[in-house]
Image: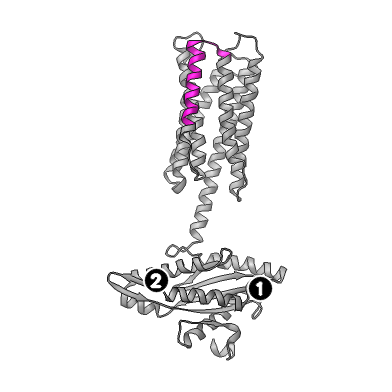
Amino acid sequence: MSLDVHTILVMFAILAFLFSGLLALAGLHAGSIGSGVRQWALASLLISLGFLPAYFYSVPAPGYEWAVILGSTLVAAGLGLQFTGIQTFKEEPRHWGAAALFVCIVFFESLWFSVLHPDAGSRSIANSLLFGVSCAACARMLLIRIEPPLNTAYWFTGASFAALATLLIVRAFMIGFTPSGTYNLYTNTPLNSLSFFISASVQLCVTFGFVLMVNYRLIIDIQRIASRDMLTGAFTRRRLEEEATRLLARCARTGDVLAIMMIDVDHFKLINDHYGHPVGDEVLRRLAAIAQTTVRTDDYFARYGGEEFCVLLLSTTEQEALVLAERLREAYAAMILEMEGKTLKSTVSIGVADSTRTSLDWPTLVSAADQALYRAKQEGRNRVVLYANLSMPTSTIA
């Protein structure tokens, strides 16, 4: 099979252009990662335009040297944007200065070896090495440890960048071994044909890998949104129950104990009726903020429903949970909310239970904490009650 260099470069330019359109459309609805996606869309467009001069120019066509300079600079700009696009996608500081310096070096090097001191072989060696270093830098940012499923997309894209960097560096060394003055960029030699064909294929893999990164990141963002209550930022009840199932199974294996706190805002309906629902919403937000700063980092705080919240505490007994519950209750009771000239103080009642007093069954554990919460409200609210301290039978309380 004969591979024509011009055809390879032009077909790759067309595919890169189509990918740029795809990424541009994705960037319109990519949320927080939209900026990084749009940078990659522009990068694909610039790389596409960088390869297009291959269709119009060949040695010794007039303007060939300037077409090569333009093409090399556009490809360098595209690689630079891929570099900063990865940093933007990862929400890291962007090194625009490094990317701009890289483009300038490629431009002046191409100008030197194309116009001032023409040497096609030296120019191709320098460009291959520079592009290879850029791809290696991109690979370094992606070949890292990260949670699934992003790790699959990161490693696929990073491996593609690493393969492209290796290919470009090998190409530079192979050109270095060709006789001086015999190399030409568009000559249909096996070195040019195979290196351009493989490079174009791997570059498409790089773009496909980035599309995978965007897809997985959006899935993770959607899952994160679905697992968080929009008003308070606490976990949703569904997410809490999923974590409870996992933690209870772990406790069954290890013999560990799991505690639960059910928290309810006292007289919340009166707050809504007297102050209005916006104030009621702010009360819930303030309670969530206090709770999230009070509970430990490995505890699970969730909005269970309405004005009721729940906390899961692994490796914690009722007595240990009591200390945390009292701290939360006191911190919330000390809060003073001022809105529209009105001052509001609110309190919470808390029921606490643990798996040693009930069983490793989620509905049973919740029921026990609910009974303790009900007793706290019966006894005057603004207090913490342990399930172990209930004196009357469970059936009477329920």
Residue 177 versus residue 1: which sits nearer the camera? 177
Secondary structure that dominates the magenta span? helix
Q: Secondary structure at mark 2?
A: helix
Q: Quadrant of the C terminus?
A: bottom right
Residue carrying label 1:
257
- What is the total number of numbered labels drawn onto the structure image? 2
- What numbered label is drawn on residue 270? none
Which picture quadrant has residue 193? top right
* Residue at the (43%, 46%) spot, across then down: 29
Q: Earlier in the sequence, mark 1 or mark 2?
A: 1
Amino acid type, label 1: Val
Tell me: residue 169, above or below residue 25. above
Instruction: Look at the image and say whether residue 39 sits in the magenta stretch.
Output: no
Residue carrying label 2:
283
Expressed as whole percent of the image width and height from the top left, the position of residue 360 reads 66, 74
Expressed as whole percent of the image width and height from the top left, the position of residue 229 reads 46, 64
Mark 1 closeness class: few <14, some 14–19, many ≥20 residues within 10 Å: many
Q: Which residues are magenta?
A: 99-121
Amino acid type, label 2: Val
Q: Secondary structure at mark 1?
A: loop
Asked if residue 346 lies left or right of residue 95, the reply is left
Mark 2 closeness class: few <14, some 14–19, many ≥20 residues within 10 Å: many
* Residue at the (60%, 78%) spot, across then down: 319
* Residue at the (57%, 66%) spot, across then down: 299
Instruction: Look at the image and say whether residue 106 sits in the magenta stretch.
Output: yes
